[in-house]
């Protein structure tokens, strides 16, 4: 008789535990869904509260860290975003979106080397995620890795030929390395594609200036890029 009573108690306790866990999980998912809803409406402060409630209810609901990280990113709280992305990536190594957005957070903090490291992994996890090549090209430009920047921007333009600002950026890089002819060619394409009249006027003035200058692809720029490329490969 005692055996049956003990067995009944164990079954009852186990049932209550599972019921309690289900309630917690249900609450976590509900809070997470609220976070997604607020994010879709760009109400990021409310989204952060909801994702935080979801995490409190279930720390293993890793997507809540990702959602909160995105919300922090869109509110320009880059360090907090990186912290959430770090935790999410620890448990989801192959999730390339989180790598991309963490890279963006690093980029906005002007930590271009770490940004490029994340962008590099994105190109491995999903080579067809074209957006990463544009932002990696800009990050390489910021670091003075001009030929890597040209390579990235050229690849991006091959897949997004109507994106005006990519030509503007590539034109700037060509100007940096002294290839004024290619700079002018890219700037002209930008003026044809862009609707930003103020920038177009400025670029047309730049085009006129560059057309009077000879190309100056000097060895100093080439050597600088070679040294930068070697430093990147050592990271």
Image (cartoon, rainbow, N blue to C red):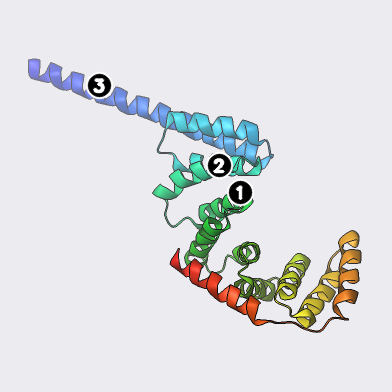
Q: Which residue is mark 1?
A: 109
What is the spatial separation of the Cα atoms under label 3 and label 1, in whole angstroms?
51 Å
Residue placed most toward the observer, 62 or 77: 77
**Disc 2 secondary structure class:** helix
Q: Is residue 167 left or right of residue 12?
A: right
Asked whether the viewer can see residue 16, the reply is yes
Residue placed most toward the observer, 146 or 7: 146
Pointers 1 and 2 in contact (C-beta within 8 Å)? yes
* Residue 170 placement: quadrant: bottom right
Above or below, 21 relative to 175: above
Asked whether the viewer can see residue 1, the reply is no
Crowding at mark 3 (Cα within 10 Å: few <14, some 14-19, many 20+): few
* Residue 154 placement: quadrant: bottom right
What is the spatial separation of the Cα atoms under label 1 and label 2, in whole angstroms?
8 Å
What is the spatial separation of the Cα atoms under label 2 and label 3, in whole angstroms?
43 Å
Q: Which residue is mark 2?
A: 79
Q: Which residue is mark 3?
A: 13
Q: Earlier in the sequence, mark 2 or mark 3?
A: 3
């Amino acid at each position: 008789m005692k055996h049956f009573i003990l067995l009944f108690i164990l079954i009852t306790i186990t049932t209550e535990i599972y019921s309690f866990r289900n309630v917690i999980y249900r609450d976590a998912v509900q809070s997470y869904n609220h976070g997604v809803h607020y994010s879709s409406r760009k109400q990021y402060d409310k989204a952060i509260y909801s994702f935080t409630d979801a995490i409190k209810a279930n720390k293993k609901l890793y997507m809540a860290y990702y959602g909160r990280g995105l919300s922090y990113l869109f509110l320009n709280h880059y360090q907090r975003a990186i912290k959430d992305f770090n935790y999410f990536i620890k448990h989801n190594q192959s999730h390339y979106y989180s790598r991309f957005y963490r890279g963006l957070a690093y980029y906005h903090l002007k930590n271009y080397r770490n940004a490029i490291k994340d962008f590099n992994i994105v190109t491995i996890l999903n080579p067809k995620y074209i957006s990463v090549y544009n932002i990696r090209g800009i990050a390489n430009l910021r670091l003075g890795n001009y030929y890597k920047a040209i390579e990235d921007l050229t690849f991006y333009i091959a897949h997004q030929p109507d994106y005006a600002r990519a030509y503007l950026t590539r034109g700037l890089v060509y100007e940096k390395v002294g290839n004024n002819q290619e700079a002018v060619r890219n700037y002209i394409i930008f003026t044809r594609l862009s609707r930003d009249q103020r920038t177009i006027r400025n670029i047309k003035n730049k085009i006129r200036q560059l057309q009077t200058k000879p190309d100056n692809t000097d060895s100093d720029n080439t050597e600088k890029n070679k040294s930068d490329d070697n430093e990147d490969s050592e990271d």
